Amino acid sequence: MSSKTAVADDIDVIIDRLREAVRRRFGATADIDNIDVATVGGINRTVLFDHVDGASRRRLVLRQETYTTEFSPFLPPAKQWPLLEVCVRHGVPVPAPIFALDEVDQLGRGYVVAFVAGETLPKKLLTDAAFAPARALFPSQAAEALARLHAIAPAEVLLLDDVPDSIDAL
């Protein structure tokens, strides 16, 4: 069984609510602009935007759950968010968590993280000559990230106790 969550699909409504969520957290003078809705995002809506406060500008990303299923292999945002925080504390390379959505935001389940520039399309990463240097670095960088991840004490991630092991070999 799969279903759409109770989240507005009108992008203008989403942007207005996101602007208010940013102002609640960063003050009445905070604003958002340079908004781009990513075309890929799996089960989440991905909205890239700039948080603007005076002369300060920071690129951020809204990850908003828009589709749920009883048998989803993905963790819900309520579990993803605290895991991001744990990973940051341990130096695991993840986007910096900025804020989690709450009921007042009227945006459903999700969170805002810092934008990380880079390529995400597998075909480009695997075949484009421009990414050859990155491909050469990937094994050692992945090993370092995995070592940091595996060094996290299980007591710090008890929220995963009710998550069944994946049948995916990876």
Image (cartoon, rainbow, N blue to C red):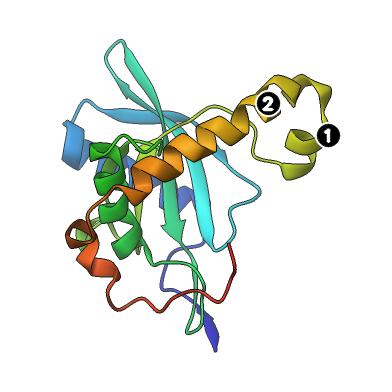
Q: Secondary structure at mark 1?
A: helix
Q: Amino acid at mark 1?
A: Thr
Judge whether residue 8 can be spotted in this image. yes
Residue 136 numbered tag? 2
Question: Residue 145 or 46: which is nearer the viewer?
Answer: 145
Q: Secondary structure at mark 2?
A: helix
Spatial separation of the CA atoms under disc 1 and disc 2: 13 Å
Q: Is residue 114 left or right of residue 130?
A: left
Query: What residue does disc 1 label?
Result: 127
Residue 143: x and y in percent read 50, 39
Judge whether residue 17 can be spotted in this image. no
Quarter of the N terminus within the rendering = bottom right
Residue 59 numbered tag? none
Asked if 83 appears above or below 95 in the picture, the reply is: below
The image quadrant that residue 22 belongs to is top left
Question: Residue 21 or 153: which is nearer the viewer?
Answer: 153
The image quadrant that residue 5 belongs to is bottom left
Q: Residue at x 73, y 25 (%)?
A: 131
Q: Amino acid at mark 2?
A: Ala
Residue 122: x and y in percent read 73, 43
Q: Residue at x 30, y 47 (%)?
A: 151
Residue 4: x and y in percent read 51, 75
Asked if 19 appears above or below 135 in the picture, the reply is: below
1 vs 2, front mark: 2
